[in-house]
Amino acid sequence: MPRIRVTWWLIMAWMLSAPPVLGAAWPLADIDVEEAATQISRYVYVPEGQRFGAVRLNATLLGQGGEHRLMVRLDGDIVHLVEPHGRQTIRAALPDLTPGFHRLDFLGWPARYMADESLQERCPMPLSRPFQLRELSLDYRPRSTGEVALKHLPDGLFNRGHPGGGLGHLTIEAGDEDAYTAAARLVSWLDRQADLRWETGTRSGEVDFVIDIRHDAALAPPARVALIPARWEGEAPRPATLEIRYRQVRALHAAVLALLDVTQRDQLLDAYADFDVERREPAWARLREPRTLAELGLEDIRLASTGHATYLLDYPPHWQPTGVPRGQLLLRGQAGLPQGVHLNLWMEGALSGSQPLHEMASHNIERTLPLAGVAVPERPRLTLELAAELEVPRHCYLSLQGDLWIDAEESEVGFEYVPKAGLMALIPRLIAAPSVRLPEDHADAGMQLLTALMRAHRQAATPDPVPYRVRLAGDGGDDMGEAPSVEIRVEPAMADRLQARFPERLQPGFAEGALWWRADEQGRGLITAASPEVLRRGAAVLPEHWWRIPDGTREALLHAQDGTLVVLAHRPTPVAAPSRALSRDQLHWGLIAVATLFALSVLWLVWWRWRRRRQGA
């Protein structure tokens, strides 16, 4: 017996001392099953150079009494089948996942029951008891399968398909302006590949990947780029790293340009590459006017026969709406919807469109739903709610395999607008003239705030990199002079100055934890904080609150903790002719109208000349 106890203690000690294997989770959207044979798909992406092992599907099934059935298929193969009674926790082991997209199909059959005797005449067929899948996720252990060629970027650095995005760390030597410029250009491209967050300075223990740019006078080639894969197992786990070393500045710029240009990047067949000669520039980002649901970040929408869905439409934050929202939704597919179903649409809480879905063909569906808002939005952000509703009591709804698909590529929602003046004029200016000045002593904190400003490119610009130029400078005065498009400063005396200027408007201590944002007449921005810590905290709240900055705001404080906005100077600008993104239909009818007017003018001129001749005769 003592020998057995010793053996168990040895096993426990070995388990505690064994190198940890880090696991990961992939959250999946909830699923509602209301009808027989409902099939809903979810997707998982495995990047190049990885394999997902120890994969397990987790879910909590919630349903009323009765025998439900749930089948799960992975890439067409059945991997789990269960017939739960009421609430049940699901834990299902899945095969390892190789690089590429994988589809999980959830097929459900709700329990059936007969209506009460009092409803038998109205409900002669069995009805369904719906059930739901909640807390749906995949647990897995990412494993490296070897080196990843630079051509596969951003694969090998982070998972661009993961719904949680990722946290990247920028490692840059202090005082290296060229490295900051290179990092800003890389971030402007990578930030469009996934919902990323960035940090600088001291690395936290939870980063997903690292971009490390350093000058190396002893480097043999003028510049070298290496993609080092992540390591999750062993005594020293490490994140994936894009390592850039350079001896010559021109070679550093050539390396970055090669990574940003898709044609040149596709030729990088190894995990590392040396650079010397100049490279051509890629296609740089330019302003855009998103109007389709796909351009606003949505995919094709599936609605069950009595389903509801709410979406947030984010337009460029420098837009000031001047007209009511208008557009149309294109219905691409419909199956099994009973007579009496209506598709209703609300924008900003007001009914903006309604379409009966009866008498639709069983195939080749294509029907448009016009929509029109009732008021001009205050901000460039709309709430869109879709609902398929049945005009009979829900408890007497027959079980049908009904659903409806809305084409995101062809569905449009937009409004007339004017570009905002003041602080938000910085957004388009950063696309046209991307010059930046960071505080030399706190360049890492300023860089973190700059990455937050770049998030506006997601709505305002095409998905291309931005040719940032970063300069470092000591703290200066208030005169912007020949300032860049945006300058970020750290000024410890900022709070006292503002408190002296606005004693009746600012609570003592408020300015110490806020970003002080000013703009000149040309739209250039100056953002000041009392400490580098405020710059870092402000980077987290700025993209969530700049939608609230009014048009014409010239000076404001934005608190870095909760986003409280205090407008200090506001000068409204005269409303010019609104900009408007014309749809293809609007352009088509506009050309027809112009051609019609021209033809009528020609006919009138011919008639007039004929009449003159007749009178002369």
Image (cartoon, rainbow, N blue to C red):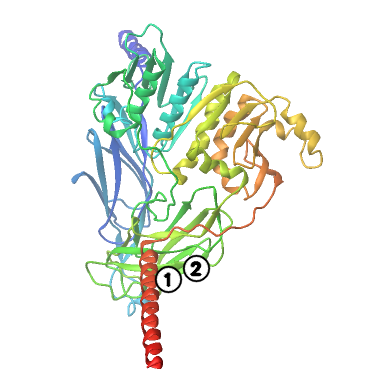
Numbered-mark total: 2
Q: CA distance from mark 2 to mark 1?
A: 8 Å
The residue positioned 71% from the left and 34% from the top of the image is: 511
Q: Is residue 606 above or below residue 111?
A: below
Residues packed near mark 2 inside 10 Å, few (<14), some (14 to 19) or many (20 plus): some
Q: Quadrant of the C terminus?
A: bottom left
Q: Residues within 10 Å of mark 1 (few under 14, many from 20)?
A: some
Q: Tell me which corner region of the image, top left, top right, bottom left or bottom right, holds residue 321.
A: bottom right
Residue drawn at 24 percent across, 24 percent down: 145
- For the point 76% across and 39% down, which residue is it? 506
Q: Is residue 66 above or below residue 564?
A: below
**Would you place residue 213 above or below residue 99 in this image?**
above
Q: Secondary structure at mark 1?
A: strand
Depth order, front residue of 192/68? 192
The reply to whether residue 342 is in sight is no
Residue, disc 1:
354
Q: Position of residue 7 (x, y in %)?
A: 31, 11
The image quadrant that residue 221 belongs to is: top left
Residues at discs 2 and 1 in contact (Cβ within 8 Å):
yes
Disc 2 marks a residue whose amino acid type is: Leu
The residue pinned by badge 2 equals: 351
Q: Is residue 133 found left or right of 94 in the rendered image?
A: right
Q: Could you say where residue 76 lies in the image, as x and y percent from the top left?
A: 18, 46
Q: Is residue 605 left or right of residue 436?
A: left
Q: Which amino acid type is shown beneath numbered disc 1?
A: Ser
- Of residue 303 and residue 518, the one placed in the foreground of this image is 518
